Image (cartoon, rainbow, N blue to C red):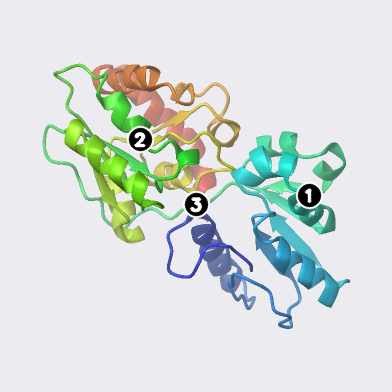
Amino acid sequence: MITPAPAGSFHGNRVTASRWARLLRDLGHRVRIAQDYRGEPCDLLVALHARRSYEAVSFYKKQRPGAPLIVALTGTDLYGDLRKSRNARMALEWADALVLLQPLGAAALPAHLRGKARAIIQSAVKPVRAIHAPRGEFRVCVLAHLRPVKDPLLAAAACRNLPDASRIRVLHLGRALTRGMEKKARKEMAREPRYRWLGEVPRPRALSILAGSRLLLLTSRLEGGANAVSEALAAGVPVLSSRIPGSIGILGDGYPGFFPAGDARALARLLDRCESDTAFYRRLRDLRFQSSIRRRP
C-alpha cells in the first residue's frame, strides 16, 4: 500500500492507509505500507493519491503489467490535480479499480472512468475516553493541519464575529506545515482569546479531545472525504462543515450544518446558533445518529 505520507505522521493519507491495512490484516491478508514501490513481490498494489503516487504506480505497471492496481483518490486529486496533472490522469487510466471516499466524488471523474469507481465511506472507532471541556465552555474542535487548502484560520476569524457573551472556545489540533503558517496561528491566538492552536497532538489524545467537544468544525476548501468527519460521527459529535462535495457526499445535501466555504461571518452565525438554539443543536446531533452506523469498521 503506497501513501506519500511518511511513517509516524498524522496526515490524512497515512491515517487512511493505516486503517485500511489494519482491516485487511484482520481479514487475513499481509499488508506493507510504504512511500514508494521498488519492485517488491506482491499480489496487489493500492496507491493513495493518484498524482503523488504516480512514480510508484508507473514502476509497478512496468514491473508487473498484469497485476491488479487500485488507486484511491484524495480531494486534491478529484478537485485539482485531475484537471492539471497528466500523471494523475494516467494513474487512473492504469488502475483496475478506483476508490472514492464519498459518492459525489464520481462526478469529478471523466465519464469513461466512473464505471470502475466505488465509494467507501471512511470508518472510525469510537474513542476510549473523552477529554471534556471545563464547565461552562462550549468547545469546538478543529482537526486539520495548517495548510491553505484547509483554510485553517477561518475558525479564528469566525470567533471575532461571535457575540461578546459567547462561551465558545475553539481548540485547533494540527501541525503547521510552514513557519509562516505557524506565525499566523500564534498571531491569531494572541489576537483572539477564544481560539487556541495546540499544534500536532498524538492521535489518541486528539480523538479524546474531539469526543469531549460539542462540535467538530471542518473549514476545508476541498476534501475527498475527511477522516475527521467520520471520526466525529463515530464519537457522537455533530459536525459543522464548509459546503464542499467531500462533505456533502458524507453528510447529505440537506444537512443543516453547512456554511459557504471561506465565509467567516456565516460560520460565526452558525456557531452562535449551535450554542444558543438547543433545538437546532439537537437536530444536528440526531442527524449524526442517523448516519453514524456507516462509520464503524
Quadrant position of the N terminus in the picture: bottom right
Which quadrant of the structure image shows residue 286? Answer: top left
Q: What residue is disc 3 on?
A: 296
Disc 3 crowd, CA 10 A, few/some/many (<14, 14-19, 20+): some
Residue drawn 25% across and 35% down?
188
Nearest the camera: 232 or 27?
232
Q: Does label 2 or label 1 sit earlier along the sequence?
A: 1
The Cα atoms of the two marked residues, 3 and 2, are separated by 30 Å
Q: Residue 246's spot in the image, x, y percent?
A: 58, 37
Q: What residue is disc 1 on?
A: 86
Picture layout, residue 110 above or below residue 123: above
Residue furthest toward the left? 135
Q: Does label 3 or label 1 sit earlier along the sequence?
A: 1
Task: Give the structural element (helix, strand or loop) at label 1.
Answer: helix
Residue drawn 47% across and 28% down?
242
Left or right, 19 with reference to 90: left
Q: Residue 19's spot in the image, x, y percent?
A: 52, 62
Residue 174 seen in render = no
For the residue marked with disc 2, what is the amino acid? Leu
Nearest the camera: 216 or 77?
77
For the residue marked with disc 3, what is the amino acid? Arg
Which quadrant of the structure image shows residue 97? Answer: bottom right
Task: Give the structural element (helix, strand or loop) at label 2.
Answer: loop
The answer to whether marks 2 and 1 mark residues whose Cβ atoms lie closer than 8 Å is no
Left or right, 60 with reference to 244: right
Q: What residue is disc 2 on?
A: 153
Residue 291 seen in render = yes
